[in-house]
Image (tube, rainbow, N blue to C red):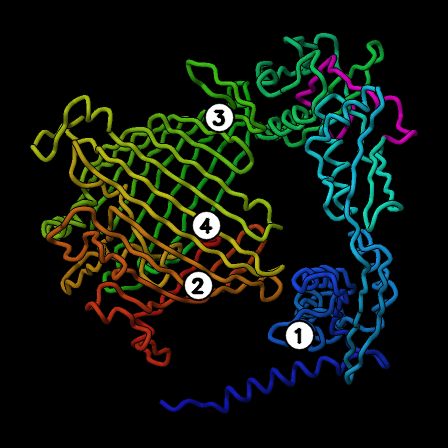
Amino acid sequence: MKTNYSKYLLMLCSFFILGCSNTKFLPEGDLLYTGGSVKVEDSILKRKARKALETELENLLRPKPNKQILGLRPKLYIYNLAGKPKKEKGLRYWLRTKVGEPPVLFSQVDLEYNASLLRNYTENRGYFKTKVQSDSTRNGKRATAEYIVKPSKQYKIKNISFPDDSTALGKAISRTQKRSLLIPGNPYDLEVIKQERDRIDARLKEKGYYFFNPDYILAQVDSAKGDHEVNIRLKTKEETPSKARKPYIINDIIVYPNYSILTDSIVYKKDDILHYKDFTIIDSANTFNPRVFDRTLYFKKGDLYNRKNHNLSLNRFVSLGTFKFVKNEFKVDDSIPDALNAYYYLTLLPKKFLRFEVKGSTNSAGYSGSESKINWSNRNFLGGAELFTLSLFGGIDFQISGKNGGHDIYTFGGEASLMWPRLVAPFKWQNSSEFVPKTKVLIRYERQSKSEQYTLNSFKTSFGYLWKESAKAEHELKVLEINYVSPKNVTASYLEEAATNSSLSKVIEKQLIFGPTYSYTFTNTLKNRKIHTFYFNGELDLAGNITGLLLGSNAKKGDTIKFFDVPFSQFVKVKTDFRYYLKLGKESKLASRFIAGAGYAYGNNTVMPSSKQFVTGGANSIRAFRSQSIGPGSYKNIDPNAIFLQDELGDIKLEFNTEYRTKLFSIVEGALFVDAGNIWLLNEDKNKAGGQFSKDFMKEIAVGVGAGLRFDFSFLILRTDLAFPIRQPYLVNGSNWVIDAVDFGNRSWRKDNLMLNIAIGYPF
């Protein structure tokens, strides 16, 4: 096939011309500002430190030039292309104001102001008497700014002294010296001094000094003695008010659980006042059982004020999920000196609410469909801030493509759950976390029907605990989880094919699974400003272990024990999910995920139940392959007479995904990705040659690549990913890589290899 290179050359030239035309629309006599540079001239600083300082200083320069991609400024070009709209709506207005970006003009650059910024920054870092020179360079209709920074030798800290007076405040500050951020020998840095003041203030807040603040600390810097060294003396300012110089205790604690933030006024009668332990509760509606506040508040009457307990109490009120607003204030008690009265004003969320959800999706298995769900919730079901939720759901997926098309899936069911904001247990568990521990009971029924195949009835119930030890770490322990799956209405044609296909027969087996499960999640992805963020989830599933050991079940010897004529499952399953996000720029990142899992069945059964086995492939996995179509190992079902599409299952799973994400414009984000992985069987299956895990497992890894667009509508992210395989594990060994076979111009290749996935949210 002859390639039309002239077309690509024309496109390249067009982009070059478009990039150049950005200067055509500049105001008369002005120039396009293309950026500034900083050069640090210092013979003492090492090259690496000098370059780091130059980077820090360049980030201070204002204004920032127009954004570039591959040397071009597409946002500026779109701004110019759209022109000035006649009205504040329509496509032209949207392109110019939302997608485009106005030119940054050289007339907006204040060289002296930037020079002053650079000088102040370097002197605050200890480079006193810094000299800064500024200049500019013009090139056609473009201009740049250049700054030369000549710092003197950096001053370092020689000695630090804390208050040595005999006052209670002075002694309290002196006791914080052990963990001081100001260390002799370190460079002088104004930012570190500010951090030190904040650190001291935080320590004092833990000791009752409610009215103290960092501005009351004065850092006196003496650079007169020594060779480029400074002595720093910390002291309290003379104008520090008397109330900031003493610690306070907590006296009365008053809670308003039914406070209206709209009226911002409190009217109550004497009968509305309830005294419970150390608390005074004012609520004419008796909305809550008073024990809710005893478990949530960390202050008790007579306690020394402590900011940690202050924030802890507020966070626990918020985590109850019952209040829309939580307001708190402390007032000095009129009758008791050095005492604070604590007031909590709690604005309720609607007690009962109804939510309706609709979602649509399509996947690489050829299914398209939708699901609807209606939830009714009560946020204070039993008067103790319990959350009761009743859900009904239903959906349908149409298989509109593929060789085995026509087998639509119908799903409907219901779920009821009750969550207590405490640990319901026979023992007392003291939790000092800022998050309220919770107990959850769940009952669920789901009916799934596959046309012309079978119907599965699934019953599930569980009882367990959820608790957070911090904002980053969360635990979930289901003390008991019971799953019962029963097939109905299995068609004769399905039974006929299942008789010779173990994958199909496993799906319609009755399953009884019970036992504890535990999961642990750690993440710091809440802090989006970090360069490196992580997510980890580990799951442990122990099904039927104690029961199997007590009853002496042994399926290998024929000693299978049944409950209600169904053998219970006995296995151990472990799964880990690790994700790493590397921030490359303000609007781009590299996201990676690694999944590893294994399940081992023993005792009462020899194979894992199908609902607990691993699968791979699909919109949130290896996107170049149909959902649940990869593996196990190098096995591939190539039966041309198969009527029903089988889902491949495994006992071991390894998967790796990585993708580059970057914002293109407005709400549109682009991605390039690579997915790899497979599943394997722990034991040999004669019907699945090559499916068992072995030392050669790396030769059986499936690999796919692709690109996608993501549309961020704030309330949801719509994702479209187009992928194709470059390594197929089921091909003859040695020819698994199929990069050479990639042919986008071939219709047959596109039909067999291109996979379009449309989904909601990121894959990981």
- The residue shown at (24%, 49%) is 650
Q: Which residue is mark 1?
A: 73
Q: CA distance from mark 1 to mark 4?
A: 33 Å
Real-space Cα separation, disc 4 to disc 3, in angstroms = 27 Å
Residue 261 visible in the current orientation: yes
- Residue 685, how many percent across, how many down? 13, 50
Specify whether 265 is left or right of 740.
Answer: right
Magenta-tinted stretch:
236-265
**What residue does disc 3 label?**
438
Labels 3 & 2 near each other (Cβ < 8 A): no
Q: Is residue 312 above or below residue 641?
A: above
Residue 579: mark: 4
> What residue type is disc 2 on?
Phe
User: Which quarter of the figure has residue 205?
Assistant: top right
Among the two numbered marks 4 and 3 on one chain, the one whose residue lies closer to the N terminus: 3
Label 2 Cα neighbours within 10 Å, binned few <14 / some 14-19 / many ≥20: many
Label whose residue precedes the other's in the sequence (3 or 2)? 3
What residue does disc 2 label?
673
Q: Residue at x 44, y 63 (%)?
A: 673
Which numbered disc, 1 or 2, marks the residue that appears first in the sequence? Answer: 1
Indicate the amino acid at tag 4: Arg
Residue 621 in percent (x, y) is at 37, 55
